[in-house]
Amino acid sequence: MIFLLFFAIVFCNNLYAKEVITDNLSSDKDIKIEKINREIEKKLTYYNQAYPNIQFVHLKNGEWEKSLQALELFIGYQATSLDYEHPKELREELLFVTVAKIQMMLINKITSSYLFKVGETPVAKKQYTCVITLDAATNVLNNQIATQYFIDLPFDILSSLPEKSYLDKKQHLNFIIDHEAFHCLDSYHYGGIPMSRKDFATRHDTYKRELQADMFAIAMNLRRNKKLSLYANNVMTIRAMTLFNGELQHDSYNAMQLMINSDKEKIIHAQPMGLIKKVKQLYKTIDPSYAEYMEFRIAALEVIRLLGKPVNEYEKPYSPAGLKPNKEIVQRLMQQFLEHYKKYVGKDYLLPEHYN
């Protein structure tokens, strides 16, 4: 009986200890997340000061109901979504669709950004509002999580990488904010995605904007560090493997390489608007036509299939039926992935048996 009583006391004490440890771990995580959220606000202050007409705001993914309420207050009544060109009569419908998309991003903890022209009686005191969804826990809680969000490697491979191969969480937070801020500034300076009757025109334009956003973010990284950082090398290597994630809209390695190979001194001393102009200027030299983009898209989808990965896109179909991939482009994209995978992981990637 004494033994059983002793066992019960020890067992209960252990349970209590585990609960305390779990509570402390949870508390520590919450503290880290709140600290990161404060850092996000500080970083957005930079853009708020640089652009007096735009209010940059952060919606916390973990509190999406409250975030949507905050969004309504920030943009006011009769606001206008500016990320897509549209006739006036579709303003309300586009606004409804955009808010629904923001809700989806918040629930699924996906990073995104949206530009609005504020309506009547908004909380925001500026004429425009840039809304950024960014979940600290999913994106930048630590270096490994930051890396995992950008490259979907199996855990055993990811955890075996040396620390220097991980994306530095602090620099990664800067990169993400710069990337998302660019999307708003792009719509602000150059307009939203234009209307078109072509089936894949929106995805063509989105592809351009994603590459340009990465070019801007890598330039901002160079500007802060005054040199090409380890983080910059890592993030470019990971972007070169983006098809492994089933993503083809972030195939930005060559675009970022083009940016960092340009005049570094001018980048280091440029202001954001100057960097945006530089991005636009450089991107013109590689800007694919609609036909060229479709050729790339179909080849990229083939590489994703050969890697045995699902396509990571919400919108279907992924490509027109009946079109065959260009073998040379497939080979080039596959070679890019294989070379950077070996460089990053330290060993060859074993292609599935169906690859030929």
Image (tube, rainbow, N blue to C red):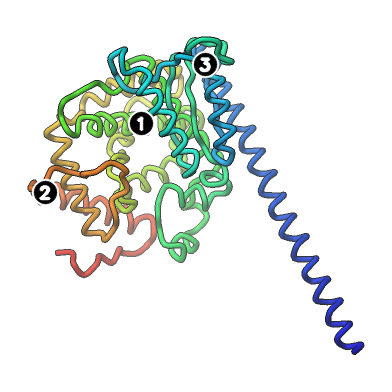
Tag 3's secondary structure? Answer: loop
Tell which circle, 2 or 3, labels the residue nearer the N-terminal end.
3
Q: Are marks 2 and 3 in contact (CB under 8 Å)?
A: no
User: What residue sits right under mark 2 in the picture?
Assistant: 325
Label 1 is placed on what type of residue? Met
Label 3 is placed on what type of residue? Gly
Please tell me which residue lies in front, 148 or 272. Answer: 148
Q: Is residue 270 visible?
A: no
User: What residue sits right under mark 3 in the picture?
Assistant: 76
Q: Quadrant of residue 183?
A: top left
CA distance for labels 3 and 1: 33 Å
Of the two numbered discs 2 and 1 in the rendering, the one whose residue sits closer to the viewer: 2
Tag 1's secondary structure? Answer: helix
Residue 52 sits above or below residue 4 on the image? above
User: What residue sits right under mark 1 in the picture?
Assistant: 215
CA distance for labels 2 and 1: 27 Å
